[in-house]
Image: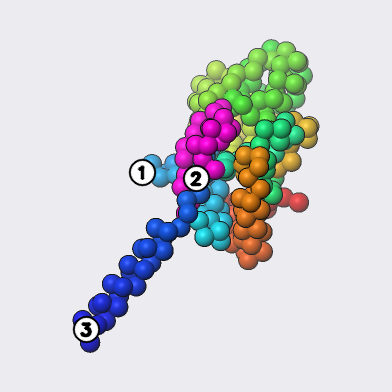
Amino acid sequence: MQLKHLITIIGLTCTVAVQAADLKELRIGTDATYEPFEFKSPDGKIIGFEIDLANAICAEMKRNCVFVESPWDGIIPSLMAKKFDMILSGMTVTDERRKTVSFSDKITDIPYRVIVKHASGLDGSPASLKGKKVGVQKATTEANFADKYYAKAGATVMRYESTQDSYLDLAAGRVDALVGNLVEMKMGFLAKPEGKPFEFAPYEMKDQVILGYGTGVAMRKGDDELRSEFNSALKTVRVNGSYKKIADKYFDFDVYGK
């Protein structure tokens, strides 16, 4: 009986292993420098809200998520070169990007804000930052906003490869303000010791043409079957409560928005 039981266990284990190996890969491009959406743990593992969400969606799709790191400013060209199947990396949906890629249904909808030093006298508006240095991440919607509003008002726009680089310069006084995603800046900088001397400015950034319509997953145009499959799985995790359960691990408000 013991031998028979052992053989049964081995058989089941092998079956599960074969089934896992048979799952078709879904290669997902991400810039793992955007805490808490996607970032690295101390042991180098890519973690975060969108990583957990992707894994839940992949489970619904019966696919095996494989995350491929890519610098942000080259992430769309890498998608077009078929280095991965989609981009899940806090990418804002804009009309300009829609000219190149197609987007899934909405993933999140989070406002953009400006960080300045406490008691700096800067309210974050373009007028208040005339003659100042404003930091942004390269190839982002906030960089386009900074070009249109801050540069034209007389500020110098400083572009960074990653948000971490911009935080280092803000803490060191090499820039006077940072423009970016409210949640990422709150959790990736303001909530940390180096962020204590800083705060969100009262100015609210508004320009839907530039700042877009929330975030989504970018895919190559023509990948309609993949887009439909992804959207169906996303809807399922929204309805069955998985999305909220994952979001509650990282946020204390509704990150999905209206």
Residue for badge 2 = 27
Q: Which residue lies under the disc numbered 1?
A: 43
The numbered mark, 2 or 3, whose residue comes first in the sequence reads 3
- Please indicate whether residue 2 sits to the left or right of residue 209 in the image: left
> How far apart in space, not on screen, are marks 2 and 1 (Cα)?
22 Å
- Near mark 3 (Cα within 10 A), the count class, few <14, some 14-19 or many ≥20, is few
Residue occupying the point 62% across, 39% down:
220
Estimate the spatial distance between the alpha carbons at disc 2 and disc 3, rounded to whole Å.
42 Å
Q: Image height check: is 247 above or below 170?
A: below
Identify the secondary structure beneath mark 2: strand
Q: Nearer the viewer, residue 148 or 176?
A: 148
The residues colored magenta run: 64-85
Residue in the image at 63% along x and 45% along y: 223
First in sequence, mark 1 or 3: give its number. 3
Q: Is residue 150 magenta?
A: no
Colour scheme employed for the rendering of this structure: rainbow
